[in-house]
Image (tube, rainbow, N blue to C red):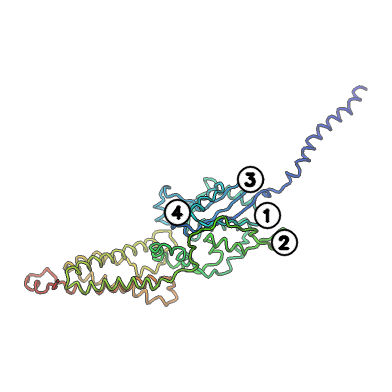
Amino acid sequence: MRSLRRVPVVAALLAAVGAVPAAVAAQRAPRDSVEPGAELAISLVTVGPGAEIWERFGHNAILVRDTVRGTGTMYNYGIFDFQSEDFLLRFIQGRMLYRVEGFPPDLSLYTGNNRSVWIQDLNFTPAQRNELRGFLEWNDLPENRNYRYDYYRDNCSTRVRDALDNVLRGQIQSQTDRFAAGTTYRFHTQRLTTNDVPIYTGLLIALGLPVDRSLTLWEEMFLPTSLQQHLREVTVTGPDGNAQPFVTAERTVYESTAVPPAEVPPSWGLRYLLVGIILAVVLLWLGIKAPQSRIAYVAFSGAGTLWALVVGILGTVLLGLWVVTDHTAAYWNENLFMFNPLALALAVTLPPAVLGSAGSKPLARRFALATALLAAFGFVLQPLPWFDQINGQLYALVVLPHIAVAIGVYRVAAAEPDRDGDDADVALQEQPAWK
């Protein structure tokens, strides 16, 4: 009987003990039932152009904030290191390795360099936020963070664009890849480098026909500011099935006091033509005066050789970029008509031809003529539909000096006699009348 009396007591104790975790679970249930990712906020950080050449195209990053813990990580896809192993070799080959890294959100590096900074809050569901954070954390692992960089097709902005679009299952691409942007890669390259004329001209020479292809809005988002702009028009499907703006809020963190980049590329054709005319006049005048003036004779020899050397080296670089590197933006470069490796042969044969070498004279004349004709031929081909590269400014700069060098070589080679003959008196009589 005593044992029977204890049964209700034991049962009551067991029920009480069991009720404790049940009560605790009941108290914790509201917090545990929160959907993963609800505590996260996703934003796009866009940074305006800076002063350095690698900063001229801007930058962007994905900011992931945990609103409960008060922490955040900013994922940057544009990290590179000049001191990294084989950086120069990879740069030459067009096989540069960039990486993504997550940093605490500190924008002072950009604002301190007087670069504009904007933040756009993005409309993701909790599940999408959680998925994006998981992908970025995976991508930031040492074994996953490096990627093969491409100036236009795989850079910091396209990586950010693709990460956002993958979580949205292609909603960004489907709304942007059907519409023409009305621009090209060269269009943006030119307008963003007008602050540095040597860089502007060098890129105009180095970039080939592929950068003149018309872009879609999707492709134009290789620029951070274009991604920022086009995302304002993107919509996503909300929980109720209706379209909602992808960008829910936007704010300016810092506005640069620097002169903003040009909206369109400059029209510098007349400037290049003026420089070309000046070079051509100087070279032609030296070539005409050379038979009567020792100073002009020496000056034309030096100037003509230097011109041919520069043109030939540039032509060799352009051919190398096309044939042996992965710089796809430099392929099919019509500038080889103007900057041709053949000019190196002129640079080698011109000095001995000027000094009177009988064997070098006909070679120098032929190489000078061939170099000038190639440049003129390329210019004549421009109206044809197969030659759509935007390089009129370079033809304005180069064609006339090529022709002037060719005329000068013919003049000098004809005036300076061969000095290999036995008749010293005839040679003396045929010497140019230097003043």
Could you say which quadrant of the image residue 273 lies in?
bottom left
Q: Residue at x 31, y 66 (%)?
A: 311
What count of labels does the image hold?
Answer: 4
- The residue closer to the viewer here, 133 or 349, is 133
Q: Give the percent coordinates (x, y) of residue 87.
A: 41, 51
Q: Amino acid at mark 1?
A: Thr
Q: Residue at x 25, y 65 (%)?
A: 305
- The residue closer to the viewer here, 164 or 393, is 393
Look at discs 4 and 1 and give the one toward the viewer: 1
Determine the secondary structure under disc 1. loop
Alpha-carbon distance for marks 4 and 2?
Answer: 43 Å
Q: Give the percent coordinates (x, y) of residue 2.
A: 91, 22
Q: Are marks 3 and 1 in contact (CB under 8 Å)?
A: no
**Crowding near pointer 4: few (<14 within 10 Å), some, many (20+)?**
many
Residue 201 circle label: none
Determine the secondary structure under disc 3. loop
Q: Amino acid at mark 2?
A: Gly
Q: Where is mark 2, residue-wise?
A: 241
Alpha-carbon distance for marks 3 and 1?
Answer: 20 Å
Report whether residue 374 is seen. no
Q: Which of marks 3 and 4 precedes in the sequence?
A: 3
Q: Where is mark 1, residue-wise?
A: 125
Q: Which of marks 2 and 1 precedes in the sequence?
A: 1
Alpha-carbon distance for marks 1 and 2?
Answer: 13 Å
